[in-house]
Image (cartoon, rainbow, N blue to C red):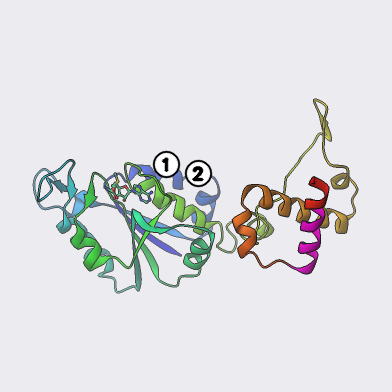
Amino acid sequence: MKFDIITIFPAIFDAYLSESILKRAIQKGIFEAKVHNLRDFTKDRHKTVDDSPYGGGPGMVMKAAPFFDAVRAIKSDGADTLTIMLSPQGKRFDQNTALRLSKEQRRLLFLCGRYEAIDERVRDALVDEEISIGDYVLTGGELPCLVIIDGIVRLLPGALGDEGSAREESFSWGLLDYPHFTRPPEFEGLKVPEVLLSGNHREISRWRRKEALRRTLHRRPDLLERSPLSDEDRRLLAKIKEEER
Ligand code: SAM
């Protein structure tokens, strides 16, 4: 998979992409990320990327011209491209979006904003999708871009050590993840649930499913309404409610 990123802070990407799973996925050729400095597409001596807003008001606006030039230069190789602008006004990023984007055949080109906004003509002429990572405002699009890339890459075949991890975690199966424990079996009087030490895989699976349902019921009941529940899930949910009455 190929990502291109336009930013005025390329070093932010160098740091994150050179650690852990993302670093190994790059080394294995699972994805590649090219980071482009927007300032390289300016024409003045000061490499200006922003200017004051028409109509007045606070903050600076990122100029259209460097974005137009950068996007044209990147697309000049003729590769099919999906251009994504990071914006708090975009569609909220979630696991389904990560999954959809992980299957994209097109290169993903991310535009990271800074300051008050990017000149609206960039959105109108160059952008296919606007994505937000949540209902809050950050200082720039770099962290949201990394959040999205991270969410996509771990779904790409071969990126995670254990393929099961991405399948069985929160949201992937419509529920929150079940609780996890590791050695020792007792720590400061706190015990690991007996069933996990039993070696009975059928019982362990059932316990995990039940605890995932319990967590989802308590923390994110909205997910249960959208989740495809089996008859067994419904029985387990009824049991949980009964136990907790
Ligand atoms: N004035 C803008 C508004 O109210 O919608 C916010 C601009 S923000 C300070 C600067 C840049 O950070 C945005 O252009 C965007 O690229 C990025 N950004 C901030 N919050 C974000 C979020 N929740 N999701 C995605 N990108 C975000």
Q: Which residue is mark 1?
A: 15
Depth order, front residue of 77/154 = 154
Q: Amino acid at mark 1?
A: Ala
Work out which residue is located at the far front of the displayed protein and give it: 245
Where residue 137 appears, x then y in whole percent?
35, 44
Q: Find residue 95 and report its image quarter.
A: bottom right
Is 106 situated left or right of 207 in this image?
left
Ligand 1 within 8 angstroms of badge 1 C-beta: no
Label 1 element class = helix
Q: Looking at the image, which residue is at 45% across and 55% down? A: 149
Q: Find residue 159 and report its image quarter.
A: bottom right
Where residue 190 appears, x then y in whole percent?
81, 31
Depth order, front residue of 153/145 = 145
Is 204 situated left or right of 20 in this image?
right
Is 184 situated left or right of 109 in this image?
right
Q: Is residue 63 magenta?
A: no
Q: Amino acid at mark 2?
A: Glu
Residue 30's mark? none
Is 38 situated left or right of 56 in this image?
right
Q: Which residue is mark 2?
A: 19
Q: Looking at the image, which residue is at 31% across and 52% down? A: 112
Task: Kindly indicate whether the residue at mark 2 contacts the one at mark 1 (C-beta within 8 angstroms).
Answer: yes
Where residue 47 appears, x then y in whole percent?
14, 46
Up-down relation of residue 179 to residue 91 (above or below): above
Classified by dominant secondary structure, the portion drawn in magenta counts as helix
Up-down relation of residue 164 to residue 54 (above or below): below
Please state the extent of the stretch shown in magenta in the rendering: 230-240
Label 2 element class = loop
